[in-house]
Image (tube, rainbow, N blue to C red):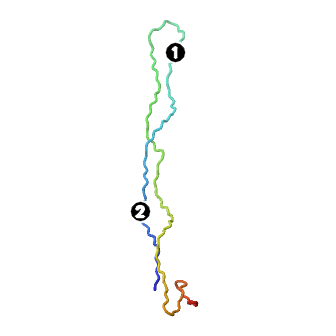
């Protein structure tokens, strides 16, 4: 008579566990920078001259630099996205059934004791 028992057989299947979403947002911050500017100043000096006075108006154009701000996008970094497999071990449990032999004596018979699955030994105390 064969004696059977169940064994656990793990089976794996791949399923979607979730996802990762990477997005960008824009933040604003105020930046300050120093810019050297050039301008002209008029210097008027009075000196004595010989001759008669000249009448009239003299106009001297004066220039200066003004700052205007423009912006340009510049790549300062990047985000790299990759996946890698990771192995782990998990413990699984399940109920298994097994057949257990039962020996029933009827009449005057000699009983053998089951020691392991390949060896039977005769008992002398019965």
Q: Decide which of 24, 47 is in the foreground and name it.
A: 24
114 to 76, vertically: above or below: below
Label total for image: 2
Question: Between marks 1 and 2, how big is the CA–CA gap?
Answer: 87 Å
Q: Where 7 falls versus 43 (above or below)?
A: below
Look at 54% across and 83% down and name the residue there. Answer: 116
In the image, residue 45 lies at what x, y percent?
Answer: 53, 14
Residue drawn at x 44%, y 10% as measured from the top left: 56
Q: Which mark is residue 15?
A: 2
Mark 1 neighbour class, 10 Å CA radius: few under 14, some 14 to 19, many 20 or more: few
Q: Residues within 10 Å of mark 2 (few under 14, many from 20)?
A: few
Q: Is residue 14 left or right of residue 115?
A: left
| Residue ranking furthest to the top | 52
Task: Give the percent coordinates (x, y) of residue 10.
Answer: 46, 70
Q: Is residue 112 above or below residue 38?
A: below
| Residue at 43% over, 46% down | 24
Secondary structure under badge 2? loop
Q: Which residue is mark 1?
A: 44
Question: Which residue occupies 48% across, 90% down?
Answer: 106
Along the line of sight, which residue is nearer the eye, 10 or 53?
10
Q: Position of residue 76 (x, y in %)?
A: 48, 44
* Residue 3, label in figure: none
Comes first in the chain, label 1 or label 2: 2
Front residue of 1/31: it is 1
| Quadrant of the frame with the C terminus | bottom right
Find the residue positioned furthest to the front: 107
Rendered position, 47 above or below 119: above
**Which residue of the protein is positioned furthest toward the right in this rendering?**
125
SS type, badge 1: loop
């Amino acid at each position: 008579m064969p004696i059977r028992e169940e064994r656990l057989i793990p089976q794996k299947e791949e399923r979607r566990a979730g996802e990762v979403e990477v997005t960008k947002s824009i933040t604003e911050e105020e930046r300050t920078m120093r810019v050297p500017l050039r301008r002209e100043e008029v210097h008027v000096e009075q000196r004595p001259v010989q001759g008669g006075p000249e009448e009239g108006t003299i106009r001297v154009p004066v220039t200066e630099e003004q700052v205007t701000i423009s912006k340009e996008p510049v790549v300062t970094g990047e985000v790299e996205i990759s996946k890698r497999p990771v192995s782990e071990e998990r413990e699984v449990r399940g109920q298994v059934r097994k057949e257990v032999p039962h020996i029933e004596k009827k009449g005057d018979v000699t009983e053998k004791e089951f020691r392991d699955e390949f060896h039977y030994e005769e008992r002398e105390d019965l």
